[in-house]
Image: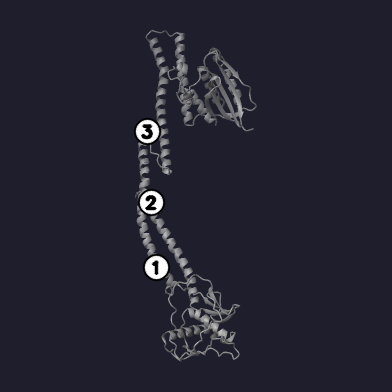
């Protein structure tokens, strides 16, 4: 099944949104579970203000902890009983009703400035209104079966001015299922020694300080519940999940719109590229794409245009190659045919001169075929090379000696610079002789009589450069870049006898490329053409 780019983009964007939403929900669930526990315990500490006040006042009455029970079990139950008593007392004061059992008596407290201060809870996150957390559940009904009264004050205990605390009696059942908070409160002295309530352990907890005057006297500690806020966290996450579901629904709609726009943005250049490729495959090499984009698709269009240009030039070169090859082969064959037909008709005799003329045409034809064959094999990488260590300068000098007769016949003078210290390269001597032969023949053919040909060499870092300069006439500037193309001649109107087939320099370029070197053409100081052959020097 084929999926369009728009569908693929939509699915990719949608999956990304789902992934982000799922990750957000997971992280939120984890963070809410952690932070809600801290948040809840700080609220619980703040709701123990009355217990803190009660402990502070009892300590102020006794000036010590003698008011605490001595029995271990009663110590563990004392804070729970105090919390229940204070809750019932507050409830009765608010409603004016009597408690279940005996009446709680509490004399009026004369208004006076408090002597002792009760410190606020330990630093914590800001506390939200009570509506955010459920109120502490009321204690169960207290039948008149158990009476707990604080111990009487010591006779010599110092009383705080303006404060008196009468004995208070509360009734509680023999068995009470206390709420979670009642069983998680611990009272520690200022040295963190156990006084009452839950026995300390390694469970995570939070505490608030209790002061008498400016003196720290105790800590009221609340141990974290194992799962204190699961219900609240669930409610919060449910609310957030509903919002996230709405966001996901909107995101799906937006992703569809975004995917459509992106697909349209990408589909147009891709379709143009596809259509252009079809045209290229059908042989329309003049096809070009617009290069208005600055992204990767723009670079792709630029590369496509470069490829189309190279294919167009290659096709033109192929057509020119076929035309030039046909022309170069037809010329000597036409001459041979004319000579043979003339001899057959009796117009010409089979004289040594006529036979020599036909032999020259055959040799020229044979040379052309050899060059074409060598170029064809070089194009496919089948031209054989037998590399060995050789002296390129000495090889060039030896080949120059073979052209002495042609130089004298053309009234040209050959000069050579001094040899350099190192001209050792890796190469095929037969192929390099072919290069030097083509270059010398090209210079002799195009240099005006009375001119000069100069051969020199120099070392540039790890490169050997052999230079061949000839004198006038010069090569036009526009022709320098095309020297080395197959069948290219500076003057197309010249005949083959004077200008050659135009394959020699092309074959030289191929041979130099196989030797990891290069051939370059420029204007010679003597007014003609300069040819530079660069070879990598052999490592010593």
Q: Which residue is mark 3?
A: 286
Q: Which residue is mark 2?
A: 9
Report the residue at 45% width, 66% height from top.
29
Q: Secondary structure at mark 1?
A: helix
Camera-side mark, 3 or 1: 1
Q: CA distance from mark 3 to mark 1?
A: 64 Å
Q: Position of residue 391 (x, y in %)?
A: 61, 26
> Would you say 230 lies left or right of 451 here?
left
Quadrant (top left/top right/bottom left/bottom right) for the C terminus: top right
**Can residue 210 be seen by looking at this rendering?**
yes
Q: CA distance from mark 3 to mark 2?
A: 33 Å
Q: Secondary structure at mark 3?
A: loop
Towards the viewer: 157 or 480: 157
Q: Which mark is residue 238?
A: 1
Considering only order in the chain, which callout, 2 or 3, is on the residue closer to the N terminus? Answer: 2
> Would you say 348 lies left or right of 378 here?
left
Dot 1, how many residues are within 10 Å of its Cα: few (below 14), some (14-19), or many (20+)?
Answer: few
Q: Would you identify the image quadrant in which residue 186 lies?
A: bottom right
């Amino acid at each position: 099944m084929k999926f369009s780019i728009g569908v693929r983009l939509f699915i990719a964007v949608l999956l990304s949104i789902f992934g982000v939403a799922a990750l957000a929900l997971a992280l939120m669930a984890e963070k809410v579970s952690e932070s809600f526990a801290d948040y809840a315990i700080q609220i619980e500490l703040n709701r123990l203000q009355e217990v803190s006040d009660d402990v502070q006042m009892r300590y102020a009455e006794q000036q010590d902890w003698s008011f605490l029970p001595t029995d271990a079990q009663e110590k563990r139950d004392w804070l729970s009983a105090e919390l229940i008593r204070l809750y019932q007392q507050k409830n009765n004061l608010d409603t004016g009703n009597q408690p279940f059992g005996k009446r709680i008596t509490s004399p009026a407290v004369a208004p006076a400035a408090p002597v002792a201060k009760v410190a606020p809870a330990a630093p914590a996150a800001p506390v939200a209104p009570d509506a955010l957390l459920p109120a502490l559940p009321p204690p169960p009904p207290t039948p008149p079966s158990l009476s707990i009264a604080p111990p009487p004050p010591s006779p010599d205990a110092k009383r705080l001015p303006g404060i008196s605390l009468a004995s208070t009696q509360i009734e509680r059942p023999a068995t009470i299922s206390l709420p979670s908070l009642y069983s998680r409160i611990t009272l520690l002295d200022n040295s963190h020694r156990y006084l009452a309530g839950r026995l300390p352990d390694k469970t995570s907890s939070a505490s608030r300080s209790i002061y008498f005057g400016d003196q720290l006297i105790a800590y009221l500690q609340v141990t974290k519940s194992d799962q204190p806020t699961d219900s609240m966290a669930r409610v919060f996450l449910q609310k957030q999940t509903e919002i996230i579901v709405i966001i996901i629904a909107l995101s799906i709609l937006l992703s569809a719109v975004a995917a459509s726009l992106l697909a349209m943005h990408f589909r147009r250049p891709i379709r143009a590229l596809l259509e252009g490729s079809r045209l290229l495959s059908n042989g329309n090499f003049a096809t070009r794409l617009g290069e208005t984009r600055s992204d990767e698709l723009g670079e792709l269009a630029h590369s496509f245009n470069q490829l189309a240009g190279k294919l167009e030039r290659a096709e033109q070169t192929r057509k020119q190659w076929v035309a030039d090859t046909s022309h170069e082969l037809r010329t000597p064959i036409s001459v041979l045919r004319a000579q043979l037909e003339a001899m057959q008709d009796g117009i010409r005799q089979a004289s040594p001169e006529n036979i020599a003329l036909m032999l020259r045409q055959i040799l020229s034809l044979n040379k052309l075929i050899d060059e074409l064959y060598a170029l064809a094999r070089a194009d496919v990488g089948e031209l054989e090379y037998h590399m060995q260590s050789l002296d390129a300068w000495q090889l060039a000098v030896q080949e120059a000696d073979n052209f002495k007769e042609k130089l004298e016949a053309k009234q040209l003078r050959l000069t050579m610079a001094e040899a350099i210290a190192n001209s050792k390269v890796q190469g095929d001597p037969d192929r390099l002789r072919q290069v030097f032969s083509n270059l010398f023949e090209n210079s002799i053919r195009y240099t005006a009589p009375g001119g000069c040909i100069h051969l020199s060499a120099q070392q540039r870092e790890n490169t050997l450069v052999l230079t061949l300069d000839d004198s006038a006439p010069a090569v036009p500037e526009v022709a320098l870049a095309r020297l080395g193309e197959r069948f290219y001649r500076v003057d197309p109107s010249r005949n083959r006898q004077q200008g050659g087939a135009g394959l020699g320099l092309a074959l030289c370029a191929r041979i130099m490329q196989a030797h990891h070197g290069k051939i370059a053409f420029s204007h010679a100081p003597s007014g003609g053409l300069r040819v530079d052959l660069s070879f990598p020097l052999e490592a010593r």
